[in-house]
Image (cartoon, rainbow, N blue to C red):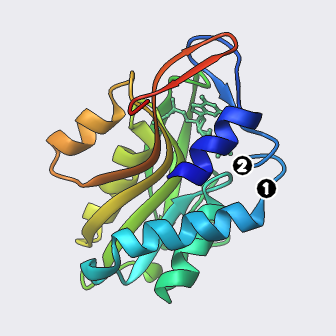
């Protein structure tokens, strides 16, 4: 998506070979006009997949996923990183390890919001190792939902996330695919 790639070129900052800072328009301050355009683009791509719910993970996935859900006219379900069994006894959980952040967290989903009749589109801001997406898929499969596809804003194509997900049979649609990062350098796959 040209709009997103241009914005990454002008405002994104490669801190090193692994990390791209996009905090001025995606994950700290959020450009809602950009999110609106992103939402329409991802929704259009998956429009014929009979999507019934959009699913994302708190927190940075929420703005783009909300716009996708709005464009498709379906609810947004937000997976929690801290599920409380006190507040909600019908939760299922799975453990996800983030290599980028070097931590492990529990991803929670309330069973009332996804059923076997759902066709779910998963939307997230970054795809790196694919751990968040595969954790989400584990929860959705436990509830026998169909996974309609995966929509990503920024894919770090030099990491194994996409191939893991494609090998598992999922369609991955990424708006910006990054081939290489280096301090001060951002290269896209299709440059
Ligand atoms: P994976 O799910 O694909 O395996 O990715 P990984 O665990 O390695 O990274 C997950 C977290 O790190 C996500 O944030 C993701 O947004 C963030 N992340 C990954 N690569 C980058 C990057 O190059 N730049 C930035 N800015 N963030 C990156 P999270 O833990 O879910 O936190 P939140 O911000 O959504 O709350």
Which element is circle 1 on? loop
Distance between mark 2 and mark 1 Cα atoms: 5 Å
- Residue 186 picture location, percent across and down: 58, 22
Q: Which mark is residue 30?
A: 1
Number of numbered discs on residues: 2
Query: Ligand 1: does it lie within 8 Å of the C-beta at label 2?
Result: yes
Picture residue at 39% right of the left edge, 78% below the top: 114
Q: Residues within 10 Å of mark 2 (few under 14, many from 20)?
A: many
Residue 96 in the figure: left or right of residue 138: right
Residue 103 in the figure: left or right of residue 157: right
The reply to whether the C-beta atoms of the residues labelled 2 and 1 are less than 8 Å apart is: yes
Q: Do we see residue 172 in this rendering?
A: yes
Residue 129 in the figure: left or right of residue 31: left
Depth check, front residue: 77 or 144: 77
Depth check, front residue: 181 or 151: 181
- Quarter of the image for residue 141 reads bottom left
Q: Do we see residue 77 in this rendering?
A: no
Picture residue at 71% right of the left edge, 49% below the top: 26
Of all residues, the one furthest to the bottom in this rendering is: 73
- Residue 34 picture location, percent across and down: 69, 61
Depth check, front residue: 43 or 108: 43
Ligand 1, by image quadrant, is top right
Which element is circle 2 on? loop
User: Considering the image in quadrants, where does the C terminus appear?
Assistant: top left
- Residue 112's place in the image compared with 188, above or below, is below
- Residue 10 picture location, percent across and down: 74, 35
Which residue is identified by label 2? 26
- Residue 2 picture location, percent across and down: 54, 50
Depth check, front residue: 141 or 70: 70
């Amino acid at each position: 998506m040209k709009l997103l790639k241009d914005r990454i070129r002008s405002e994104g900052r490669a801190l090193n070979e692994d990390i791209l800072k996009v905090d001025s328009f995606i994950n700290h301050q959020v450009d809602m006009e950009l999110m609106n355009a992103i939402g329409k683009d991802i929704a259009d791509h998956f429009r014929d997949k009979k999507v019934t719910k959009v699913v994302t993970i708190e927190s940075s996935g929420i703005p783009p996923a909300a716009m996708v859900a709005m464009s498709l006219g379906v609810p947004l379900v937000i997976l929690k990183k801290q599920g409380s069994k006190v507040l909600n006894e019908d939760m299922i959980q799975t453990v996800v390890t983030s290599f980028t952040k070097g931590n492990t967290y529990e991803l929670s989903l309330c069973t009332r919001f996804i059923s076997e009749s759902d066709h779910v589109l998963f939307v997230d801001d970054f795809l790196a190792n694919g751990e968040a997406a595969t954790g989400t898929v584990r929860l959705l499969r436990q509830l026998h939902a169909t996974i309609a596809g995966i929509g990503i804003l920024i894919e770090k194509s030099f990491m194994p996330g996409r191939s893991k997900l494609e090998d598992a049979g999922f369609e991955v649609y990424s708006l910006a695919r990054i081939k290489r990062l280096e301090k001060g350098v951002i290269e896209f796959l299709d440059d």
